[in-house]
Amino acid sequence: MRHLMRVIGRAASAVLMVAVVSLVSTAPAQAGDCSVPFNGTYTAFSDGQWAKTNDSYHDEVSVTTTWTVTTSCASYIDCTGQVISDAGWTASAKCNSGVWIVSRDVPNWEPCADGTAATGAQKFNFNSTGPNEFSGWDKTVGPSGACGINRWLTVVMVFTLTKRE
């Protein structure tokens, strides 16, 4: 009986410890700060070595481009701007809760067996990781039903943005 009481006591202590750790680690989130605009020339890198295609790791081609960024902030929660890539596209930028979002369409992104191709919706999500450095995700999604397949083709790559000197 004494052994059973020790086991129950230890189990109760373990459950209590897990509950306390869970409460402490789930403190309320605070909204991120968008008050610092970032402007200038940056190296944008999407790392294909760590890409996920439809939630499975699958190598993709890594992409390095140069971005020219112009942003401004009306308040700490209202920042917008524009990105011009040396890859030949321009897109708007918006900051939401400390995360910058750059969205654009990628023509002919998903090639089909019949020779056609579907447009992909590319979204870069990133936040500041240090002075003049950002990291996040480059996610491109093809439309469901493209190429006769009833699901979205999704490719996600680790993304970094580093200011050039």
Image: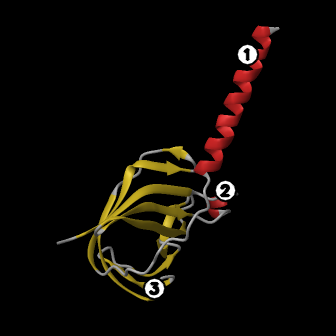
Q: Is mark 3 in CB contact (under 8 Å) with mark 2? A: no
Few, some or many residues within 10 Å of mark 1 (<14, 14–19, 20+): few
Label 1 sits on residue: 6
Few, some or many residues within 10 Å of mark 3 (<14, 14–19, 20+): many
Which one is earlier in the sequence, the residue at label 3 or at label 1?
1
Residue 134 point in image, percent of width and height: 36, 65
Label 3 sits on residue: 80
Q: In which quarter of the image is the C terminus?
A: bottom left
Which sits in the foreground, 142 or 147? 142
Label 2 sits on residue: 149
Does 152 appear above or below 82?
above
Does 113 appear above or below 22?
below
Which structural element holds mark 1?
Answer: helix
Name the residue type under label 2: Ile
Mark 3 or 2: in front is 3
Does 153 appear above or below 133?
above
Q: Residue at x 47, y 44 (%)?
A: 58
Q: How far apart are the alpha carbons under marks 3 and 2?
A: 36 Å
Q: Quadrant of the N terminus?
A: top right
